[in-house]
Amino acid sequence: MIPERYAPATYALFRIVFGLIFFMFGMQKLAGWFGGPRAPIMSMFGAAGTIETVCGLLIMLGLFTRPAAFLASGEMAAAYFIAHFPQSPLPIVNMGERAAMFCFAFLHIASRGGGMCSVDGARGKK
């Protein structure tokens, strides 16, 4: 078990890693990085890629963390209900596990803010 005194550091790692992965999904859509197809910027995938890139970077840096994470959580909820839910309500069946996990991880980040190792924390924002 990890002692409670490490909670701020593990939360910072949680925020940074989830922000980085979200950023990479965005760059996959926008620039075709990491083996993904490049989406047209004026399409639904282009809009998703823009949100993922910008919000992922902001979450990773801990800058405007709460609004960025709230927007990212909403995007993942929309992605789940638009792309996955019509096939089945169960994430394990409809392959919406990532969208569901991102949605609730970002909702948690939106409720906690930047924490340590964040620009918001350095600026004195709660």
Image: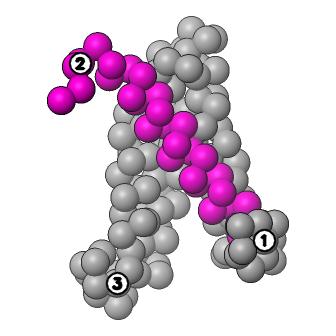
Q: Residues within 10 Å of mark 3 (few under 14, many from 20)?
A: some
Instruction: Using the image as rendered, state which of residue 3 and residue 54 is in the foreground.
Output: 3
Tell me the quarter of the image containing the N terminus.
top left
Vertically, is 35 above or below 64? below
The label shown at residue 50 is: none
Segment tinted magenta in the rendering: 1-30
- Left or right of 31? Residue 49 is left
- Quadrant of the rendered image containing residue 35: bottom right
- Left or right of 57? Residue 112 is left
User: What is the total number of numbered labels drawn onto the structure image?
Assistant: 3
Q: Secondary structure at mark 2?
A: helix
Q: Which residue is mark 1?
A: 32
Vertically, is 78 above or below 16? below
Residue 113 drawn at (x, y percent): 46, 28
What residue is shown at x 23% (from left), y 18% (from top)? 4
Q: Is residue 77 magenta?
A: no
Vertically, is 96 above or below 94? above
The label shown at residue 4 is: 2
Q: Main structural element of the magenta stretch: helix, strand or loop?
A: helix
Circle 3: residue type:
Asn
Residue 60 drawn at (x, y percent): 60, 37
Q: Of discs 2 and 3, which sits in the foreground?
A: 2
| Of callouts 2 and 3, the N-terminal one | 2
| Of callouts 1 and 2, the N-terminal one | 2
- Left or right of 64? Residue 97 is left
Circle 1: residue type:
Gly
Q: Secondary structure at mark 1?
A: loop
Residue 117 drawn at (x, y percent): 56, 20
What residue is shown at x 42% (from left), y 66% (from top)? 98
Q: Which residue is mark 3?
A: 94
- Quadrant of the rendered image containing residue 89: bottom left
